[in-house]
Image (cartoon, rainbow, N blue to C red):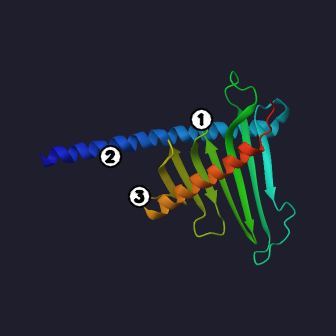
Amino acid sequence: MKRTIFLAALITVFTVSGLSQREVGEIRKAFAETNAKLAEMADHPELSSVFAVDLTVNKHSAPYPAVGIYQRTATFYYTYGDREKDPYPNRLLKISAVYKRSARVENIDFYFDKAGKLIFAFASDPEGSIKETRLYFTAGRLIKMTDDGKEIGLKSQHAVEAGTLAKKESARLTGIFRAALIDLD
């Protein structure tokens, strides 16, 4: 009986792990496709179906009291969704955010699936104790996290906090993007 329970648990772990690996592979594929579209947009903007909106807080980098140089920039990359229902581009592909505080520069990129759900977040902080963090999401839940290439347990407090923060920040920025779209109707 104990052996049967152990084998069932082991099979469940390998099945979940296999699903997770397949999902991570699909996320990496979507990541590569999005970056290829963005490269095409940069090379041939007049032929691209990808658009960009930039938002910069404190564009001229005037120093903030007790902070110094402070600037936040977000670039929203978007394309067409369902053209039969809505002829205007409004499907978010990626958000690239840069946060500058004094000499510190942090970057975070958020990638979205065709339904507009967060699937991947990549954060880099060259001055931080952790140089880069990668977070993979499926159906709104964190399925994999790495810090500087080392996998982090999903039940750890660090992973829970990082996943929650990434979802909150991507939702906040997505709201800003939605508000920035011009209603062309």
Image quadrant containing the N terminus: top left
Q: Secondary structure at mark 2?
A: helix
For the point 61% across and 64% down, which residue is it?
Answer: 131
Give the residue pinned by disc 2.
13
- Would residue 84 appear left or right of 12 to someone viewing this image? right
Q: Nearer the viewer, residue 9 or 21?
A: 9
Amino acid type indicated by mark 2: Val
Give the residue pinned by disc 3.
155
- Most extreme residue toward the bottom is 66
Q: CA distance from mark 1 to mark 2?
A: 28 Å
Amino acid type indicated by mark 3: Lys
- Would residue 13 appear left or right of 68 to someone viewing this image? left
Q: Secondary structure at mark 3?
A: loop
For the point 25% across and 46% down, which residue is it?
Answer: 9
Percent position (x, y) of residue 71?
A: 78, 63
The crowding category of the residue bearing disc 1, from other C-alpha atoms within 10 Å (few below 14, some 14 to 19, many at least 20), is few
- Most extreme residue toward the right is 60
